[in-house]
Image (cartoon, rainbow, N blue to C red):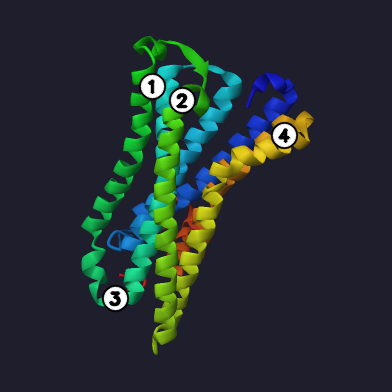
Amino acid sequence: MNSSRDPFEDAFMKNLVAVGLGVIITYINGIFVIAFLKNPVFYTDTRYILYIHLVINDIIMLCLSVTLYVLSYALPFLNVTICSALLLFTVTTSENTPLNLAAMALERYIAICKPLHHHRLCSVNRTYVLIGLIWFLTFVPALADLFIVLVNEPISIFSTSVICYSKNVFGTNQHLIRTIVVESLYLSFVWMTLIFTYFKVFMAAKAATSDQVSARKARNTILLHGLQLLLCMLAYVTPLINYFFLALFPKHRTIFMYFAYLVSNVIPRLLSPLIYGVRDQKMFRYVRMYLMCGLFNAKVIPKANET
């Protein structure tokens, strides 16, 4: 977004809202992270490890996204090296989310459909290996964007300055092809995983004579994974939405781009604690105690069935 098109008052309010939402959402997410870190009862549960990784990833992505947004006004021309590093980790954290959702859906599928194998297949060590694999699968394609720049441009480009926007740094046809191939592959895998796990859990719930409540909760959780994935995909369709509305209302270009940014990059980061943390009674009980008694003074004694 070009700050030169906005009067100072409008630019100030937009940045104030973006930063304010970022701080509030990061604070809420941070409460869940603290609740996890201060209570060892969560350390051995694969479900909560994957969940808190999703929350931490959202915190990192939100901080990077808001930083880039503020810099587009405060320091429009940024050194290419710094800009590339910020974009590299922003893209990585953005693509982490769908893969993490797929991992969480698979964990619920194994817990419901293969409960006798859950402890072995979803061990803590394997969970951390899976998280490392997720970062590897998203960081390497993002790193490839830098190598494409090195192949097509002289090394001196990293000492120049540019408006820090993805297409300004990674705007070649090779970058476009890389993005389309990788994101299509990953999103197709994630959607197939969600659909497969949902119907498997659905069939297990119909066939179950006991513990139908857990099966129903798992099925609803996977549906929420799909909802969150749809919202994550807004980032991919936002350019098309912007193009459509800008063609109809060219005088309101900056307004549409601003709201598209909030809806696709900021608001979805609040979904992880609201969808999962609040729904989960075990996690929410700890979070509520920290909110009521103070972050560092509260001591929550786990129930016998939570250890």
Q: Label for residue 246?
A: 4
Please name the amino acid that badge 2 sits on: Thr
Nearer to us in this view, 270 or 130: 130
Q: Residues within 10 Å of mark 1 (few under 14, many from 20)?
A: some
Residue 206 image position (x, y, % from top left): 44, 84
Say whether disc 1 or disc 4 marks the residue closer to the N-terminus: 1
Residue 102 image position (x, y, % from top left): 39, 57
Q: CA distance from mark 2 to mark 1?
A: 8 Å
Please name the amino acid that badge 1 sits on: Val
Say whether disc 4 or disc 3 marks the residue closer to the N-terminus: 3
Q: Is residue 123 visible?
A: yes
Q: CA distance from mark 2 to mark 4?
A: 24 Å
At x 39%, y 61%, the residue is: 193
Q: Label for residue 149?
A: 1
Q: Are marks 2 and 4 in contact (CB under 8 Å)?
A: no
| Position above or below: 221 against 31 | below
At x 44%, y 18%, the residue is: 80
Q: Residues within 10 Å of mark 2 (few under 14, many from 20)?
A: some
Q: Residues within 10 Å of mark 4 (few under 14, many from 20)?
A: some
Image quarter of the N terminus: top right
Please name the amino acid that badge 3 sits on: Pro
Give the number of marks. Answer: 4
Residue 181 relative to residue 235: left or right? left
Tell me the residue that label 3 is attached to. Answer: 115
